Amino acid sequence: MKVRGRFAPTPSGRLHLGNARTALLAWTQVRRLGGVFVLRVEDVDPVRCRPALESDQLEDLRWLGIDWDEGPDLGGRFGPYRQSERGEIYAEAAARLSTFPCSCTRRELRASGGGPYAGTCAERPAQPHRPLALRWDPGPACTRFEDACAGVVEERVKETVGACVVRRTDGVWSYQLAVAVDDLRMEMTHILRGADLLDSTARQLAIMEALSPSTPASTDHGARPRYAHVPVIHGPDGRKLSKRHGAPDLTALREGGADPTRVVAFLARSMGMLTHDVRSARPQDLVSTFRLEDVARAPRALDPELLEEFREFAPARPPSP
Ligand code: GLU
């Protein structure tokens, strides 16, 4: 089976170093395995996404030296590669799931105390005069997978989330449905992404399996994707790296004239992929020695020395107070 992996940014903000680190890892893993790397734009939510941010994000990735074989600019067999253009594909998938309309109001949902969906609308006719969402009933099965970083995960989606929203009241397909359908239809075999998405994985796999005609442990193209939820980069204070730590976003770095080989070396060293003395690297330089096991063990927190060095080469103004 052909190895296929992806990077799937949401154009709702600029890419930051954490996104760049994940993109670099996903790219390196796929290149190491000789696979196909896909760039998918996750702009399913028109309220949050802007086309100008998409072009900045793609430009930032190219600037770092990350390339892709299929994407919105290149096309490919599994297109379109923008979620905003895949509405019919999501509608066709949702029609094959066992769904029910849901007219619960926010207040009714809050009454369940943030726990799993209580199933109110599964048992009553939805109130037609209210805006309707569409929910999918995941059934009682337990979803089990082995994550390369987090180990074995077992989850009964019905108990943790309950019936999941697949289409919101404003008609927008849910992020969970879109990602699951895309990873299935685009025949992804390797999904490497930030640890913050580990919680969504059982739900996404359960959707894929409900859509897939073959055995529960597989998807239509053969085996299930293999997941690796890599540590999200933190500042020395243990919080997710952001402007607060003086870390500029990628567009600011690129437009400010930073050297992309220093950014790549910095990111690689933050994961122990390069030794401390290497100050310049291209993504290509990381491919031959890449080992997912090493990355899984990489520390989350950036040491202060590394951050200090980064501040020196990054032509960024200090964050405003
Ligand atoms: N679009 C998501 C994000 O930007 C990533 C989704 C995924 O990799 O599955 O956080």
Image (cartoon, helix red, strand yellow):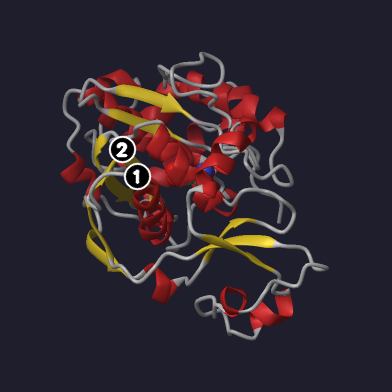
Q: Is residue 255 above or below residue 290?
A: above
Q: Is residue 292 above or below residue 114?
A: above
Please identify the residue farthest to the top as the structure is shown. Answer: 74
**Nearest to the observer: residue 263 or residue 51:** 51
Q: Is residue 154 above or below residue 200?
A: below
Q: Which residue is mark 2?
A: 220
- How far across and down, in percent of the image, does residue 181 sit? 46, 42
Category of crowding for the residue at label 1, using alpha-carbon neighbours closer than 10 angstroms: few (below 14), some (14–19), many (at least 20): some
Confirm if mark 1 falls within 8 A of ligand 1: no
Quarter-wise, where is residue 201 in the image?
bottom left
Report if residue 256 is visible in the image: no
- How far across and down, in percent of the image, does residue 227 sit? 28, 47
Residue at 62% in and 41% down: 44
Quarter-wise, where is residue 191 in the image?
top left
At numbered mark 1, what does the secondary structure look like: helix, strand or loop?
Answer: loop
> In the picture provided, is 79 more to the left or to the right than 32?
right
Q: Which residue is mark 1?
A: 212
> In the picture provided, is 263 more to the left or to the right than 145?
right
Q: Are marks 2 and 1 in contact (CB under 8 Å)?
A: yes
- How far across and down, in percent of the image, does residue 78 sit? 45, 23
- How far across and down, in percent of the image, does residue 314 sit? 53, 33
- Tell me the kind of residue under disc 2: Asp
- Tell me the kind of residue under disc 1: Ser
State the separation of the CA atoms marked 2 and 1: 5 Å
Category of crowding for the residue at label 2, using alpha-carbon neighbours closer than 10 angstroms: few (below 14), some (14–19), many (at least 20): some
Residue at 28% in and 54% down: 299
